[in-house]
């Protein structure tokens, strides 16, 4: 756990330095602000329906600099256990040679959690994504909030036009580590569909297929 906290501190320093250095390094690039809002028939998170069948509304506000540095806030109504959620994040994305690379820190906030407020910094993930063409691998490494049972989540995704196929693997130090397959179809820029089902260690989870329909509306041009 000490190693994870050291990693979290190092990533935070590097991301902060990138954000602060961006205006000087790319003085003519400027920053773009984007916002969106959407609705879905469920809160599908890493194969799990966190809303217990209830619909969810969500929104996102993001600032991105021409250097690739970005920061934002994402919020949702849909977590049945912990209540309203909003996430704060900052990162950098861009080309490293022929690879598409993105690295970010996320903290998940639940102000109405039944066991008390879960504040910024209580639950933290480092997210690192590396892609080449249609293929992409992403690691979500829990840095805070997994003291009882260390946790990470890894996805491998392939996208072809409007279609996508992804395998996601939950990885716990102790106990079951479920894995799921998720197939997606993006009808247009706004409307998307997905089906997800656990196929590894699925005797420990709800292994019924989860069908997602979501509609996202951009609020900025």
Image (tube, rainbow, N blue to C red):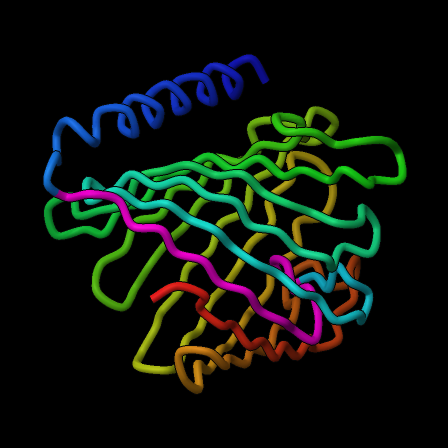
The spot of residue 148 in percent (x, y) is 74, 27
Residue at 10%, 46% in the rendered image: 97
Most foreground residue, 103 or 133: 103
Residue that extends furthest to the right in the rendered view of this protein: 114
Residue at 61%, 58% in the rendered image: 46
> Looking at the image, is 115 positioned above or below residue 169?
above
> Looking at the image, is 89 positioned above or below residue 144?
below
Instruction: Give left or right: position of 88 versus 200.
Output: left
Residue at 70%, 29% in the rendered image: 119
- Specify the quadrant that holds the N terminus: top right
Most foreground residue, 178 or 53: 53
Q: Is residue 51 magenta?
A: no
Looking at the rendered structure, the number of numbered marks drawn on it comes to 0
- What's drawn in magenta, residue-wise? 29-47
> Looking at the image, is 123 positioned above or below residue 57?
above
Q: Is residue 31 magenta?
A: yes
Residue at 60%, 49% in the rendered image: 170
The spot of residue 132 in percent (x, y) is 22, 59
- Specify the quadrant that holds the C terminus: bottom left
Q: Main secondary structure of the magenta part?
A: strand
The spot of residue 48 in percent (x, y) is 70, 61
Residue 28 in which image quadrant: top left
Most foreground residue, 141 or 169: 141
Instruction: Give left or right: position of 140 versus 199.
Output: left
């Amino acid at each position: 756990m000490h190693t994870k906290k050291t990693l979290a501190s190092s990533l935070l320093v590097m991301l902060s330095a990138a954000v602060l250095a961006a205006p000087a390094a790319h003085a003519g690039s400027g920053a773009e602000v984007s916002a969106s809002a959407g609705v879905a028939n469920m809160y599908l998170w890493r194969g799990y329906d966190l809303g217990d069948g209830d619909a969810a509304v969500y929104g996102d506000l993001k600032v991105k600099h021409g250097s690739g540095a970005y920061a934002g806030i994402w919020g949702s109504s849909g977590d049945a256990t912990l209540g309203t959620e909003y996430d704060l994040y900052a990162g950098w994305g861009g080309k490293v040679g022929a690879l598409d690379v993105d690295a970010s820190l996320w903290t998940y906030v639940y102000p109405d959690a039944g066991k008390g407020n879960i504040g910024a910094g209580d639950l933290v993930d480092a997210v690192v994504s590396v892609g080449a063409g249609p293929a992409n691998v992403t690691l979500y490494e829990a840095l805070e909030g997994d003291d009882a049972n260390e946790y990470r989540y890894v996805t491998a995704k392939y996208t072809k036009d409007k279609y996508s196929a992804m395998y996601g693997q939950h990885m716990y130090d102790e106990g079951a580590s479920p894995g799921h397959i998720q197939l997606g179809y993006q009808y247009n820029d706004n409307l998307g569909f997905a089906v997800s089902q656990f196929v590894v260690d699925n005797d420990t989870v709800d292994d019924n297929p989860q069908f997602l329909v979501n509609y996202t509306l951009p609020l900025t041009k």
